[in-house]
Amino acid sequence: MPDPLRRPVLSYGNLRQRADDFLRTYHQTLAIPVPIEEIVEFSFGIDIIPLPGLHRAFDVDGFISSDLRSITVDAFVYEERPGRYRFTLAHELAHAVLHRRIYEEHRFQRAEEWKSFQRDLDEESRTWLEWQAYAWAGLVLVPAGPLRSEYGEAVKMAAQRGVSIRKAGEAARMYVAGWLAERFTVSPMVVEKRLRYDKIWA
């Protein structure tokens, strides 16, 4: 069956290359945390619009308009959850970078219109688009070089306290993920996925 969206087929390796290219263009220093809010607003000229009750009403932290000019974010996430807020921005920016043609072929500005667009997608297309945006966002917010460097620091600090991270249990690994999450200003889950995808954790 032909795919009406003609969605891009991007592997994790493809997404890594696209994320690396993005960082070379917009954040060459790779200093952490990656200034995703500034990149969204100043490099892409995208407005960030906090909206009270967005998650409660539509079960989503944020969405980008089809003209790629604004990202609407749940106001509570915007004000109180910096890790989720930053990931939401990166995730929605991923749609602008990876899926521009698809979004520009549709018309939605308000949350109700976005929800209708989502409902009209077949499940496979929606799953692929969201997975690509999720993976790209993680690669941008937690770049490989800084991740390995910061993980090395965590291993060193643990060793100074007589703990081997590689031999320690799951609780110790989760503690490290939490420490790294604070360094990158993302959730521990994002760090865990990046550590596993980069085979830093077995």
Image (spheres, grey):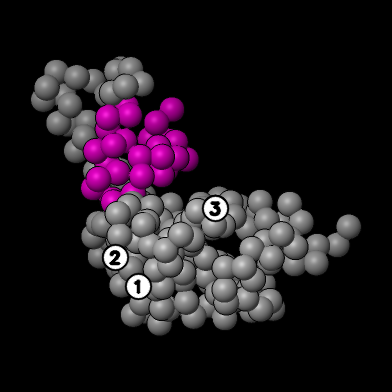
Q: Which residues are magenta?
A: 173-202
Of the residues under marks 2 and 3, which one precedes in the sequence?
A: 2
| Element type where label 2 sits in the image | loop
For mark 3, what is the residue? 59
Q: Quadrant of residue 103?
A: bottom right
Q: Is residue 75 left or right of residue 112?
A: left
> At label 1, which amino acid type do we have?
Ile
Instruction: Give the mark, 1 or 3, whose residue is nearer the N terminus.
Output: 1
- Which residue occupies 11% across, 22% down? 161
Q: Residue at x 24, y 38 (%)?
A: 179
| Foreground label between 1 and 3 | 3
The quarter of the picture where residue 117 lies is bottom right
Residues 59 and 148: in front is 59
> Does residue 166 appear in this view?
no
Query: Taking 143 as reference, is 72 above or below it?
Result: below
**Disc 1: CA contacts within 10 A as few (<14), some (14-19) or many (>=20):** some
Task: Name the secondary structure under disc 1.
Answer: helix
Q: Tell me whether the residue at label 2 lies in contact with that at label 1, contact meaning CB atoms closer than 8 angstroms.
A: yes
Q: Quadrant of residue 25?
A: bottom left
Which class describes the residues within 10 Å of circle 3: few (<14), some (14-19), or many (20+)? few
Q: Local crowd at mark 2 within 10 Å, few (<14), some, or many (≥20)? A: some
Residue designated by label 2: 35
